[in-house]
Amino acid sequence: MLPMGHASAHHDYPVARRVLDCVGRETDLKRIGFILKPENIESHQLLAELVPWVRQRGHQVVVSDEDRVAVEGVVIVPRARLGSEIDLAVVLGGDGTMLGASAQVSDNSVPVLGINLGRLGFLTPFDPAQAHDALEAAIAGELTTSERMRLAVTYRATDHPPVTRVGLNDVVIHQGSMARLIELETRLDGELVARYRADGLIVATPTGSTAYNLAAGGPIIEPGQAALTLTPICAHSLTSRPLVVAGESTLTVTLDGDSFGVVLTVDGQWAHSFLPGDVLEIAAAEKSLVVFNSEKRYFDILREKLHWGARPDRSLEDVARSERTRRGQ
């Protein structure tokens, strides 16, 4: 069994709780859904190992028809129905796979267990070797869960009905294929924030703060905080700095009349042209993504993934071992 996950020692997160509070009694967790990294052999191999184990314990295995699974004993449902057909989701992939999973299951409040088959794994904290123990602990209610804020992005064009997309990481407005500056006006709850002349703008959740936002020089925000980052991309001003604003606010973005060829993307998985006269509204989505926590704390993961504190005479494992000793683990 894996030990129960921990909340931060410095913050009392109201969103952290046992999985039983989120999905009901343990006996209700009958339908286990699996979401696989696309075209990845390792994810299919791990699924083939887990399916017999899950079915022997009396649970049903459900997968999306888009994953093209050829494993005996699984129930295949349309991708659009996966969230309503399962009680718990297991992601076999990386952070990109988790972004897709968020879109499939968050509206149904299905908790997600992330098994990392990618590179960084900020959202998929369990290693493949931990898959059986992690899943057993999740089903038994022995892991905590936490909620990850999502963004509701509404695009209002001058000649089309509004379109709303929901993202877990970020909204990016950029200059498309042409290397030229664009001009953006941003307002927070109607109040002017800034007019940016830049290659683009990133609006990120705390979860997305370690993605493109981090690469562009934006701040890292600890998950569980109700906040958004506004990070200009290569701003044509030394005083245009990243901002952190309240997550309950509504951000409105418009384009200057001379900016053309601009593209907006949500989580890098949905894209649309953005024209002068159009309006983009960004606010917190009604439903968050519920994820299972590992025994690693957030700053343990940051040190490991970003190599904080690494030096020639002391490995990251030495740092982690020292911290575990300090905690009495």
Image (tube, rainbow, N blue to C red):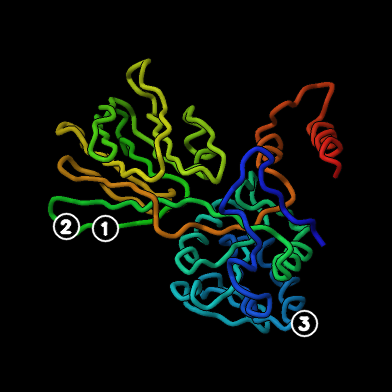
Q: What separation in Å lies between label 2 and label 3 (alpha carbons)?
A: 52 Å
Percent x, y for residue 324? 83, 39
Which residue is under mark 1?
163
Quarter of the image that includes the C terminus: top right
Let me know if residue 61 appears in the view.
no
Ranked by sequence position, the earlier of labels 2 and 3 is 3
* Residue at 47% from the left image edge and 47% from the top image edge: 169
Instruction: Identify whether 186 is placed above or below 58.
Output: above
The image shows residue 207 at horizontal and vertical percentages of 52, 45
Whole-number angstrom distance, CA of label 1 to CA of label 3: 44 Å
- Cα separation, mark 2 vs mark 1, equals 9 Å
Look at label 3 and name its amino acid.
Answer: Gln
Name the secondary structure under disc 1: strand
Asked if labels 1 and 2 touch by Cβ distance under 8 angstroms, the answer is: yes
Q: On residue 160, which mark appears?
A: 2
Residue 284 seen: yes
Residue bearing the label numbered 3: 56
Q: Amino acid at mark 2?
A: His
